[in-house]
Amino acid sequence: MSSLDIEEVRVLGDRVRVLAKTADEAVACPDCGIASRRVHECCERTVADVPVDAREVTLTVRVRRLRCENRACPRRTCREQIHEVLERYQRRTGRLALQVGAVVRELAGRASQRTLRALSMAVSRHTAIRMLLRLPLPPQRTPAVLGVDDFAVLLRPEPGNAERLEAWITAVRAEDLPHLHSFIRGLDQDRAAVIAGLTLPFHNGRTEGVNTKTKLTKRQMYGRAGFELLRHRALLGSSH
C-alpha cells in the first residue's frame, strides 16, 4: 500500500479499519493515455485486506474521479485504479485474494470456508468456489523429449511388448535422459511384473493412481459441487 497516504487506523474490537487516500499524483486516462490531475469528484471504496493479529482488516480509500485533459477523448472522466490494492469490481486487495486463492485451490468449498474463518479471512463457500474457478489453469506443455510417449505405446497389453520394452530400454540408456534412467532402474527391480503388465490383459495399475487422486478430490466436494468444479480442480492438480 505504498501508493496510499494512511490517514487513520482504528481498532474496533476484533476488527481493524484503515482509512487512507490516494496520493496527489497525475493519472493517465485509460483511453487516450494523457495524464490529468483535474479532480471531478471523490468517492470512497472499501475492500478487505490481509488480517493483522487475528483481526479482520478493512481498507477504506478515498479515490478521485479525474477529468480527462484531452477534449477529443470520448472518456470525459475516469476513476483512478491502484494495482493490487483497488482492482476494478473486486472487494479484496490483491494480496488477500492471493492468500484466499492458495487455500481454495487445495480445499475447495466448505473446507476452505472453515479454514479461512480460522485465519480471520472469512468468505462464504460460494465465494470460495467462485475464486477457485477464477484461478488460471496451467498452460499446456509441449514435451521436449518423446521418450515417455514411446513407452506409453507399450501400455496396451500385446504379446510382443516384452521385446519392444527391451528395445526401448536399450535406446533410452544410450541417451542423456537422467529421469528416464531412474525410471528404468525401477523397472529393473521387478521386471517380471512389468512384462506381465505389458503383455497380459489382466491389470489396472496404470489407472489406479489417477483414480485414487480423482476420488479424493470428489469426496472432498461430495454433495457440494458439480462436474465443472471437479474438472477445474482436476486440471489444476495436473500442474503439481
Image: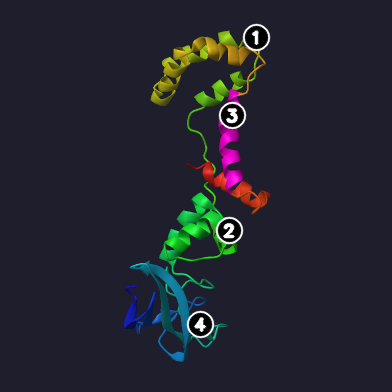
Q: Is 230 above or below relative to 48? A: above
Q: Earlier in the sequence, mark 3 or mark 4?
A: 4
Q: Amino acid at mark 1?
A: Pro
On whether residue 116 falls in the magenta region, the answer is no
Predominant secondary structure, magenta span: helix
Mark 2 vs mark 4: in front: 2
Q: Position of residue 217 (x, y in %)?
A: 57, 44
The numbered mark at residue 129 is: 2
Count up the numbered dots: 4
User: Which one is nearer the viewer's eye here, 240 or 55?
Assistant: 55
Q: Tag 1, which secondary structure?
A: loop
Residue displayed at 53% across by 43% down:
237
Residue displayed at 59% across by 29% down:
208
Q: Tag 3, which secondary structure?
A: helix
Mark 1 vs mark 3: in front: 3
Q: Amino acid at mark 4?
A: Cys
What whole-number distance in Å separates the C-alpha atoms at marks 1 and 3? Answer: 23 Å
What whole-number distance in Å separates the C-alpha atoms at marks 2 and 1? Answer: 48 Å
What whole-number distance in Å separates the C-alpha atoms at marks 4 and 1? Answer: 71 Å
Give the residue pinned by disc 1.
159
Q: Is 66 above or below relative to 234? A: below
The numbered mark at residue 208 is: 3
Give the residue pinned by disc 4.
78
